[in-house]
Image (cartoon, coloured by chain):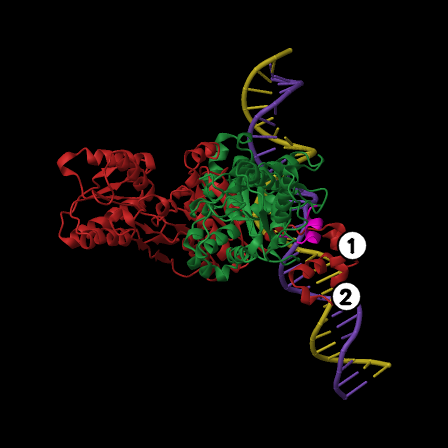
Chain colours: A red, B green, C purple, D yellow
Amino acid sequence: MYDVAERSGVSIATVSRVYRNPDSVRAGTRERVLEAARELGYVPSGNARGLASRTTGVLGLCFPDYADPEAEADAETDSGADDAAMLYSDQIIRGMERAARRHGYALLIAASLQGGPESLVAKVAGRVDGFAVLAQTVPTEDLDVISRRLPVVMLAGPREIDHLDHIVVANAAGERELARHLIEDHGLRRLAFVGGDPESPDAEARFRGFRDACRDAGLPVPDAPDLRTGMMTRAEGARAAETLLDRGAERPEAMVFANDQMAVGALRALERRGVRVPEDIAVTGFDGIPLSRIVRPSLTTVRQPIRQLGEQAVELLVQRLADPSRDPVSLELPVALARRASCGCG
Amino acid sequence: MYDVAERSGVSIATVSRVYRNPDSVRAGTRERVLEAARELGYVPSGNARGLASRTTGVLGLCFPDYADPEAEADAETDSGADDAAMLYSDQIIRGMERAARRHGYALLIAASLQGGPESLVAKVAGRVDGFAVLAQTVPTEDLDVISRRLPVVMLAGPREIDHLDHIVVANAAGERELARHLIEDHGLRRLAFVGGDPESPDAEARFRGFRDACRDAGLPVPDAPDLRTGMMTRAEGARAAETLLDRGAERPEAMVFANDQMAVGALRALERRGVRVPEDIAVTGFDGIPLSRIVRPSLTTVRQPIRQLGEQAVELLVQRLADPSRDPVSLELPVALARRASCGCG
DNA sequence: ATCTAGGGTGAATGCGCTTTCAGAAGAGGG
DNA sequence: CCCTCTTCTGAAAGCGCATTCACCCTAGAT
């Protein structure tokens, strides 16, 4: 910048104005400066600008590093269909990027390996005007410190820190509607709920919705899921389905899984065992992953508006940046029941 | 930072050391500093750090803003299948993020609206250690200036600037193999190539591969595509298919489209006209989008390793950062022929 | 007890830009 | 032709951190 100023015969202040507020500089001067900048290959330093102006024009996103990047190759060969499908975080990224662009922001993304001062989280926090965090990504302790300095919005998780904005999807309401559909529209009575890790707030909320539907219908209300799996993977779903079948006389009329992955695994397992879906038993998932539409029978599930989650996150950040003192906001995004073949609607 | 230093009774130099090089500070001192930082809610400024150290720990990606964010909603209702599928840029983002993470970098992404000093491109360039650009995203002039200051790698496009690293996929070789397959393995002789905008380097390279295959087989070698569409969209593909059919006696035995979108559109149009694929006519695409697997008949196409494009981009950037003086690198990523139903292989 | 290493710490400088605050240069009006 | 009011431009003071250099302290060697 000093070089550009010298070459065009002005001060650095004027060079700065050319970039920040072009109209405040006479046209002739401006052209000389731009010309010199071009000749010198001048690229303004975002760091210096950020330091001086105390704003970066960048929003951030931290998401969990589900897939170990090293192990990636294996996961792909395993299932081609998933390969090309969007992961949860991909969709949020897309949503945030779209919304950020509308507001003139760039987006800085990083998977959090772990907390602590060395982490990518710290790097992101130090380089953005505000950022979004996927649940269970950043240690609450770190988040607590960071959120005192800049806007943070918590995505798809419980509000661990009470002054944060946060957005969730209507897990309970969605599962309740799904279960209601099975009970009322298909006349099923014996439903089995397969949950996941008790630590997963999503899975627990879905179970609550399931219970609500049971209560609504006057059916016995379970205290806990009929079964819990650790990982909520396809393999676990298959095992769960077999376990449920082997309970003999207790065989349920419907298996309600806490997510699509498990439900898809179950579909495969049932097929192997010669159990017809939906004739012999209904199966449902939750999430609305692309695969749920492709499998046969197509999977009845609840679609989450994941991309909107990202878009809303940006909106909240922008709003808070505009008015830092406003009260914390809490949004619940609506979900949509997708009635497909696996419950008998196909 | 000054506050932290004061509160813990040390100088700012020591605070800096605690974060940058913890081992160089006595354990007791370090704990005091960390404790004070926690109490004060201290978040190190990435800007200041970057300014002082002349490095950001961030890599960037600029991609074109195909989808107007405002118009997004329409595009979705139009085709649910695409909705959940990954776009080209999404996959590159995923690839780059993975690779960047491995090297300890975060990723800054932005769609370039246009060039010029105001643009997001300029913002990205000023905030990263190096970045990747998708072809036809950033004006060559801007790129020329920027690339003199930091590493830039050009993705999937011609090397417009000769000192840049760049990566392309084997468009010509892939199309050549595809055409060879139609000619030799299926015994087809009259192939029609449907290209796109002559400005599209990808489409042109594919046409060259097509010509090569014709020459190899001793068939007449066309000077230009049998048909060109402007947009390479599904609608254009459908129109192209109908135009080709209506040429009467000249009806080709195979329609070779420059991308999957057009081929899928053609499939629909042919179905409407009662033309059977592949019995009456073979159809092929290029890209390997998720939809190509789902449509009926499934589409024979050439799969691009898009995600690897992103990963390789990061590798090149990292390497150049390590050795700025090395010669420009030019990579060509191999593609894979996907033989499916639409050519008669299903 | 004296000297020598080294590890640990502080003072000071600069990274490249934004932003007042003044001063200089034009534009009108008398 | 002089004076006032704008419009433009320059000087200078940071923004928050990394880093060099010098210094102090402690521990082991003499």
Let me know if marks 1 and 2 both belong to one chain: yes
Whole-percent x, y for residue B270 in the image = 47, 54
Classify mark 1: residues with Cα within 10 Å, few (<14), some (14-19) or many (20+): some
Q: What secondary structure is the magenta-colored segment mainly?
A: helix
Q: Is residue B66 left or right of residue B298?
A: right
What span is colored magenta in the figure? B137-147
Position above or below: B267 against B307: below
The amino acid on which the numbered mark 1 sits, given as a three-letter code, is: Glu
Whole-percent x, y for residue B116 in the image = 66, 58
The reply to whether the magenta stretch includes residue B140 is yes
Specify which label sits upstream in the sequence, 1 or 2.
1
Q: Disc 1: which chain?
A: A
**SS class, disc 1:** helix
Please say whether residue A242 is visible from this viewpoint.
yes
Closer to the camera in the image, A27 or C8: A27
Residue with the most extreme front position: B249
Q: Is residue B199 left or right of residue A134?
A: right
Q: Is residue B317 left or right of residue B253?
A: right
Image point 77% across, 52% down: which residue? A39
The nearer-to-camera label among 1 and 2 is 2
Q: Disc 2: which chain?
A: A
The amino acid on which the numbered mark 2 sits, given as a three-letter code, is: Gly
Residue with the mark numbered 2: A28
Please say whether residue A146 is visible from this viewpoint.
no
Whole-percent x, y for residue B333 in the image = 59, 37
Whole-percent x, y for residue B311 in the image = 55, 38
Classify mark 2: residues with Cα within 10 Å, few (<14), some (14-19) or many (20+): few
Residue with the mark numbered 1: A6
